[in-house]
Image: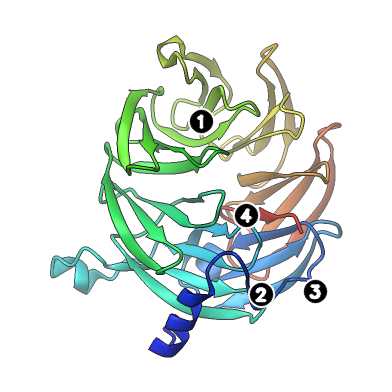
Amino acid sequence: MKTNKAKQTSFMLIGFSSFLYSLSAFSAPTVYIPLGSGNGVVAVDAATDKVIEHYTGVKNPHGLVATPDGEYLLAGSIYENAEKNNAGDENNSNLFLIHPAHGHVMQTIPVAGWSHHQAITPDGRYVLSTHPTRNHVSVVDMQSTSQIKLIETNNAPYYVLVTDDGKRAYVSNSGANTIQEVSIEKWEITRTFDAGPSPEHMVLSKDESMLYVNNSRKGTLSIIPLNSPEKRQEFSIAANLHGLDISDDGNHLYISSKSESKLIVFTPETGDKVTVPLSPKPYHLNTITGTGKVYISSRSEPTVWVIDQSSFQLINSFQLPAGEGHQMSIINQ
């Protein structure tokens, strides 16, 4: 669903210093969850663990980011237009721009292939999206709402994240066993280093000195000092790892194992592990900063579990309207 040219131009003129609408009706923080095969996105009030909005018309969304003020969502799709692909058209998939306050898709933005995961710069200006089948990361300018750059990566770029200062991004290449550092100023690869086998989800330590990486197929966690990546350490965790995030205090990592149906709480400083059974197939996860909670979705059911960050106990769960939860985005109002 595309808006007409007048509406699109209107959005581009809004800029990022002010906006016409607010999300004051939403409780804070708000967690946005793409529904994958459910073809939609939901907003969840993290105070009550209740779904408060359901946005439809988004084809098979997996990656999702929100602008820092929560005004807009950008959802990546793992749907690819086969006809355009066969014709050699680079732009054969779309990102979906959603205005939560209005509750609908405003615009689709063509990008180079189906999108897996996404990251947004702290100022909300640029969105980076991985394209595993094309060995590229695309850069979308949120002011012009268009793809402005393709960055060639190693094989099968999987996950991407951006540093808090907005100067660097890191991309995990699951088909090449590498991490690549990207200069956001130049949109160039500045470093490539080993990550361990099949690197996928990543998170930075709170001081951003360490990069934690799930090596999914081997079932290990890599801890990589960014100033000396050759000193990488690798720890055995569990089979078929997927989601990964860090506690508010930076002391613990939460890691999901789909095939073993459990959450592993790993303490990097000591190497200690605590196991929390979750069935079936725990999948994507996020710590919900300021609430003491961790949200973990199921790969095979429209379920999200809620774990206490300190006690590691299951304290709640809730149902999604359809599909399965993928890359979550959290906005603190």
Which picture quadrant has residue 104?
bottom right
Residue occupying the point 65% across, 68% down: 42
**Residue underneath mark 1:** 214
- Looking at the image, the residue that sits furthest to the left is 87
Q: What colour scheme has been applied to the protein in the rendered image?
A: rainbow
Q: Position of residue 183 (x, y in %)?
A: 37, 37
Q: Nearer the viewer, mark 4 or mark 3?
A: 3
| Type of the residue with mark 2 | His
Residue 155 in view (yes/no) = yes
Query: Where 212 falls versus 130 (above or below)?
Result: above
Could you give the CA–CA distance between mark 1 and mark 4, rounded to whole angstroms? 19 Å
Q: Earlier in the sequence, mark 1 or mark 4?
A: 1
Q: Nearer the viewer, mark 1 or mark 3?
A: 3
Could you give the CA–CA distance between mark 4 and mark 3, rounded to whole angstroms? 18 Å
Q: Earlier in the sequence, mark 2 or mark 4?
A: 2
| Type of the residue with mark 1 | Asn
Determine which of the numbered discs, if any, sits on residue 54 in the image.
2
Q: Position of residue 13 (x, y in %)?
A: 48, 76
- Element class at badge 4: strand
